[in-house]
Image (cartoon, rainbow, N blue to C red):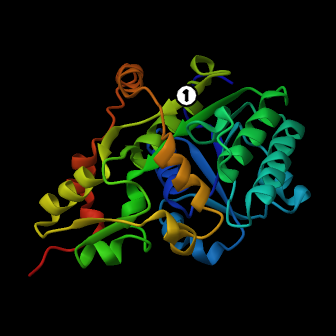
Amino acid sequence: MAEVKNKKILVTGAIGQLGGAAASALLAYGHHIRVMTSDPEKAIDIKELNVEVFQGDFRDRENMKKALDGLDGAFLMTPSGDGPKAEVTHGKAMIDACKEKDIGHVVYSSVNSANKKTGVPFFDSKYETEEHLRKSGLSYTILRPVWFMENFALPWYRPSIEKGVLSTPLRPDRELQMVSVVDIGRIVAEVLTKPMKFVGREIDIVGDHLTMEKIAEEISRVLSHPVKYDHIPESRVEKAVGPDWAPMFRWLNEHGYDADIYMTQSQFRRFEIPLTSFREYLEDSRLGIRKAA
């Protein structure tokens, strides 16, 4: 796959945070983007970016192959909404479809520490998908980002933040590694534009690291109103986040992400991709919260 622009690339998960950021970055690099979604009506915002929208489903193998017709590369995100077992099934099916359609390069979005037997179901499922990709014979790159900064703007957090409270199961002194999806999107675009520089690489991505108390302080500073940190105790974790996600928060408390932030910043600085700090992200986005009148 030559290092040129104007490639035709499939993006899955494009109506979500990361998929949308990847599609935007790939367009900025001059590529033609086809996004696959099971519900085109939800892709109104992404359509405005001048992308081709293909109605497809991870459960339909023939449909997936049609989504890949005539393409040079693919950015794969596996949906986690149906549970970890389904995530593996869907990921393997898409990789097999890429193999059958002879896709030039595949970028797979995994997660930091997926390769470390964490016992976190949604980490282990991504590792199983990674393994399938490694054995597929495809030209590939695996990206392993940490916690998305944009998560704090989601409905699970933003309403309570607006009321002055940030609640998570993480200990107040627990350091959380974070990255902006905008930065990941730029990295996806760089990899798919110049795949020969990234063939077979497995890359951790991290932009900043702060304790939970410090995160609340930074949010307070940028929003100009107090936000206190509320630690959800172990006894309430499953009720607060659900049984599928509770193991992740327990693991984050006990171990946490371990990406090398300085190495990450150094390697992407060479590609003129500066990684966003949490303060920069907040100042740019304000978590989607308007300033008080």
* Visible residue check, residue 27: no
Q: x%, y% of residue 163?
A: 24, 79
Whether 131 is drawn above or below 110: the answer is above
Foreground residue, 258 or 29? 258
Q: Amino acid at mark 1?
A: Ile
Q: Residue at position x 78%, y 28% from top? A: 134
Report the residue that reaches farthest toward the bottom: 293
- Tell whether 108 sits left or right of 82: left
Q: For the image shown, how many numbered marks are present on the structure?
A: 1
Q: Residue at position x 85%, y 45% from top? A: 97
Whether 83 is drawn above or below 137: the answer is below
Q: Quadrant of the C terminus?
A: bottom left
Foreground residue, 84 or 58? 84
Q: Circle 1 — which element?
A: strand
- Tell whether 95 sits left or right of 238: right
* Visible residue check, residue 259: yes
Name the quadrant containing residue 14: bottom right
Q: x%, y% of residue 7?
A: 62, 37
Foreground residue, 193 or 206? 206
The residue singled out by tag 1 in the image is 203
Q: Residue at position x 91%, y 57% from top? A: 62
